C-alpha cells in the first residue's frame, strides 16, 4: 500500500481487517432464555441488520433523536465512533464538514479535537437557520459547497495542512458528484474523504415516517452512485477502507475513502 501512514497505524488497520468479508456467522439457532427478558429481547432483536439499518435511517423518532451534548446530529452512532478512531489515529489538522445542519456532529468533532489538543473543524453550510453551536475550534463558512468563494476561502484555510473532508450536504447524485470534484482534491494523502448516506442507494423503497421514500427523494441516485463513478473516473487516488465499516451498521457504505 503506497499510503503515507505511520507503520503502527498500518499495522492496526491490518489487524482489524477481518478475514471473511464481514460475513456474520450463522447464529440462527442461538436460543434465548424463555424468561421475561428472553421473550422481550427475542422479539426486539429478531430483525436483520438490513431491517435495522433501514429502520434507524428512515424512522425519524430514532435518527432525529440522536444528539451530541444536547445538539441533534444526523448520524449513526457507530459512524461517530469510527470518526473518533480516525481522528485519533490520523490527527487531521483541518476537518472540513460539508453540511452541518444543527451542528451536533460539528461540535462532536470539535470536542474530540479539544480532547486531543489538536485540529480544527471547518463547518460549511448554505444555511445557519437551525445551526446551534460555537466553539473555538470551529470555523464557520456560510455558503454553498459549489460557491467559488467558499472553495477559495477553505483552500486558503487548508494551505499546507493535513486535511480530511466529510461530505454530508445534499445527497442527490448530481450535487454529490459536483461536490466530490470540488472537494476530494483537498484531502491530504493518508487522510480520509468520508461520503455519508450512500445507504439511500442500497435500499429500493423504504418508506420513511413522513411518507416519502429513498427512490422519490433521490430519483437519479445518491452518494454511493456518485462516489462509485468518481472512483472510476479518478482511479488510484482513494482506497475504500471497509475496516471502517466493521460494526456493519453504517450510513456510509463504501464511503470511508483513504487518500493514497
Ligand atoms: C444531512 S444535513 C447535515 C447533517 C450533519 N452533518 C449532521 O451530522 O448532523 C445536510 C446539510 O447540508 C446543507 N446543504 C445542502 N446542500 C448544500 C450545499 N450545496 N452547500 C452547503 N450546504 C448544503 C443543508 O443546509 C443541511 O444543513
Image: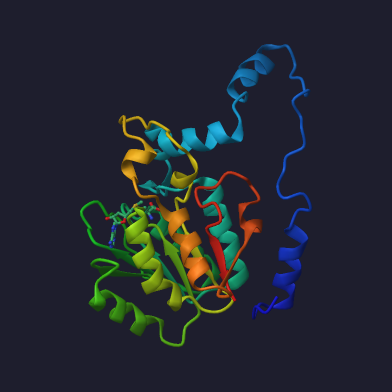
Does residue 33 lie above or below 226 as drawn? above
Task: Return the x and y of residue 39 as percentages of the image width and height.
Answer: 65, 14
Which scheme is used to colour this image of the protein?
A: rainbow
Q: Quadrant of residue 242?
A: bottom right
Which residue lies at the image location 39% right of the left edge and 50% below the top edge?
A: 221
Side (left or right) of 79 relative to 41: left
Task: Return the x and y of residue 169 as percentages of the image width and height.
Answer: 34, 58
Q: Quadrant of ligand 1?
A: bottom left
Front residue of this view, candidates 53 and 231: 231
Does residue 232 lie above or below 220 as drawn? below
Does residue 77 lie above or below 230 as drawn? above
Q: Residue furthest bottom?
A: 160
Does residue 15 lie above or below 63 as drawn? below
Q: Quadrant of residue 249?
A: top right
Front residue of this view, candidates 241 and 172: 172
Which residue lies at the image location 75% right of the left edge and 64% below the top edge?
A: 14
Front residue of this view, candidates 188 and 89: 188
Front residue of this view, candidates 122 and 206: 206
Side (left or right) of 27 relative to 253: right
Task: Return the x and y of residue 232 as percentages of the image width and height.
Answer: 52, 67
Q: Taking the image as drawn, is residue 99 in sight?
A: no
For the image, the number of numbered tags is: 0
Which residue lies at the image location 55% right of the left edge and 73% below the top edge?
A: 235
Which residue lies at the image location 61% right of the left edge and 18% below the top edge?
A: 43
Side (left or right) of 96 relative to 193: left
Amino acid at each position: 500500500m503506497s499510503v503515507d501512514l505511520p507503520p503502527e497505524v498500518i499495522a492496526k488497520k491490518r489487524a482489524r481487517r477481518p478475514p471473511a468479508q464481514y460475513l456474520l456467522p450463522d447464529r440462527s439457532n442461538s436460543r434465548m432464555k424463555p424468561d421475561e427478558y428472553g421473550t422481550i429481547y427475542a422479539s426486539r432483536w429478531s430483525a436483520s441488520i438490513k431491517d435495522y439499518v433501514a429502520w434507524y435511517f428512515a424512522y425519524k423518532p430514532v435518527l432525529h433523536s440522536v444528539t451530541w451534548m444536547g445538539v441533534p446530529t444526523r448520524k449513526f452512532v457507530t459512524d461517530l465512533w469510527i470518526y473518533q478512531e480516525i481522528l485519533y489515529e490520523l490527527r487531521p489538522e483541518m476537518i472540513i464538514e460539508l453540511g452541518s445542519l444543527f451542528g451536533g456532529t460539528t461540535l462532536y468533532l470539535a470536542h474530540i479535537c479539544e480532547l486531543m489538543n489538536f485540529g480544527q473543524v471547518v463547518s460549511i453550510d448554505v444555511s445557519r437557520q437551525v445551526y446551534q453551536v460555537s466553539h473555538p475550534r470551529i470555523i464557520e463558512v456560510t455558503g454553498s459547497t459549489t460557491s467559488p468563494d467558499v472553495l477559495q476561502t477553505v483552500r486558503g484555510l487548508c494551505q499546507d495542512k493535513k486535511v480530511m473532508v466529510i461530505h454530508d450536504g445534499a445527497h442527490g447524485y448530481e450535487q454529490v458528484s459536483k461536490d466530490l470534484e470540488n472537494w476530494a482534491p483537498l484531502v491530504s494523502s493518508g487522510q480520509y474523504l468520508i461520503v455519508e448516506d450512500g445507504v439511500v442507494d442500497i435500499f429500493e423503497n423504504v418508506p420513511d415516517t413522513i411518507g416519502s421514500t429513498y427512490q422519490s427523494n433521490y430519483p437519479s441516485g445518491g452518494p454511493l452512485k456518485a462516489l462509485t463513478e468518481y472512483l472510476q473516473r479518478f482511479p488510484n487516488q482513494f482506497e475504500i477502507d471497509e475496516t471502517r465499516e466493521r460494526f456493519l451498521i453504517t450510513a456510509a457504505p463504501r464511503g470511508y475513502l483513504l487518500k493514497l
